[in-house]
Every structure is written in C-alpha cells, then in structure tokens.
Image: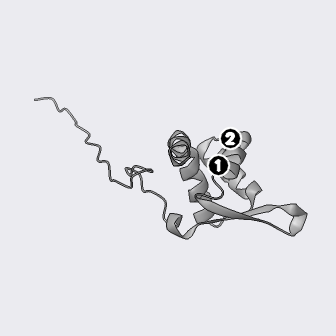
Amino acid sequence: EQAKIAKQQAEDATIIEAITEAIQAGKCKQTEIIDWCRNRHTIGRKMSERVLRQQHNNLWKREKGFQKNAWNYELTPDKSAPPANGTNYQTGQTVQTVQTVQTES
C-alpha cells in the first residue's frame, strides 16, 4: 500500500507541488486551488480534482465547508513546506543542476 502511494505521488509530483503552492498562497477552497493550478501551471480541472481527492489523507486534509458545500483544504503539518525547486519531492534531497556555458575563445 505504501509503495503504491509513493508511486502515485511520484507520478503526480508536478500537480502535488502546484496544489501545495496554492494552499500555501492562501487558496483553501477547492475551486480556488483548481483555478490556481490551471492559471499558473496549465493543469486541468480533472487532474487537479483527482490528485486533491487521492492525496487528501496523505499530504493535506479537507473539510466540507458550509458555503455551497465547498471542500476546504489545508496542508498536514509535516507537509507545510513544499519542496523547493531542485528538491526531490519523495526524498527531500537537494538535486543540483549544473549549467555549462561555452564561450568563444
């Protein structure tokens, strides 16, 4: 079961990072998170909804809101800091990318 969850998280890493970023930016309602993912990361509504549903016990928690039965999300305490660019989402290890620039002699 844990291996299956880890595999799915690896496949959805980009979407997970976008959702985490949205929640940290103060977007708590499902519609706000989906709009954030679509507008900033060109991630479709269905993909965002699927990952929100699948990962809601692992990476964030959700509660049914009172207004229009909206789902409200917040990060679980151990996931409050998203991985920075260059960080492997699964392991938390920093990955350095070296860029070489050739100059004419």
Q: In x, y percent, where is residue 62?
A: 71, 63
Question: Residue at the location (64% across, 41% down)?
Answer: 43
The amino acid beneath tag 1 is Cys
The number of numbered badges drawn on the structure is 2
Tell me the SS state at disc 1. Answer: helix
Name the N-terminal-most of marks 2 and 1: 1
Name the residue nearer the viewer: 62 or 85: 62
Q: Are marks 2 and 1 in contact (CB under 8 Å)?
A: yes
The residue furthest right is 68
Q: Is residue 55 above or below residue 42?
A: below
The answer to whether residue 28 shows anywhere in this view is no
The amino acid beneath tag 2 is Met
The crowd level at tag 2 (other Cα within 10 Å; few <14, some 14-19, many 20+) is some
Q: In x, y percent, where is residue 101?
A: 22, 36
Residue 47 image-quadrant placement: top right
Residue 63 image-quadrant placement: bottom right
Q: Disc 2 or disc 1, which is closer to the eye?
A: 2
Tell me the SS state at disc 2. Answer: helix
Residue under pointer 1: 37
The crowd level at tag 1 (other Cα within 10 Å; few <14, some 14-19, many 20+) is many
Residue under pointer 2: 47
Question: Residue at the location (64% across, 48% down)?
Answer: 37
Per the rendering, the mark at residue 78 is none
